[in-house]
Amino acid sequence: MRFFFYGTLMAGNANPVATRVHACLRDEGPATARGTLHALGEPEGWYPIMLAGAAPVHGRLYAAAPGFGEADLAALDAYEDFDPANPAGSLYLRTTIVVADAQGAFHQAQAYVFNGPLPPGALAIPDGDFAAWIAREGLRPYGAVS
């Protein structure tokens, strides 16, 4: 199983869920998906919203390594507010998308895509790179612990 992370689940975020699951994921490098990217701020920090579209969304491709199991997948789903038993009531949907790696090869990967219209107050990230946007703006990503 592969994952495309484009926001707070990428390795290096001071986020307990990301830290936990990255112990059993293999980083396969930078990757790009197609969509549109926005950010929404809350008191706990900023998080990205990926919607359908044609613009590049930058992230990283990860593969499940030995030891990755159902509990790890459930932790990711819970963090992203995805309930496989109730997709319609979920904030994000875990769905299979196609991503291109740095060499231009295409891969299928699981990604969390926002489940609904763009919320009021969401800011566009025109270059599709949440990590770079957070750094440029000097903001704290959601879930980061000090």
Image (spheres, rainbow, N blue to C red):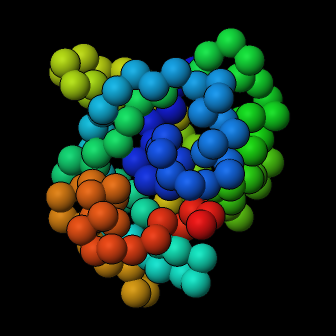
Q: Is residue 129 visible?
A: yes
Residue 61, image x, y percentages: 41, 30
Indicate left or right for 54 with 95 as reference: left
Q: Is residue 59 above or below residue 101?
A: below
| 23 and 102: which is toward the camera | 23
Indicate left or right for 141 with 19 as reference: left
The quadrant of the image that shows the N terminus is top right
Q: Quadrant of residue 48?
A: bottom left
| 24 and 119: which is toward the camera | 24
At 53% from the left edge and 48% from the top edge, which residue is drawn? Answer: 9
Residue 80, image x, y percentages: 63, 55
Residue, far top: 66
Q: Is residue 113 visible?
A: no
Count of marks, rendered view: 0
Residue 55, image x, y percentages: 19, 52
At 44% from the left edge and 36% from the top edge, which residue is drawn? Answer: 4
Indicate left or right for 121 with 72 as reference: left
Q: Is residue 78 above or below residue 126?
A: above
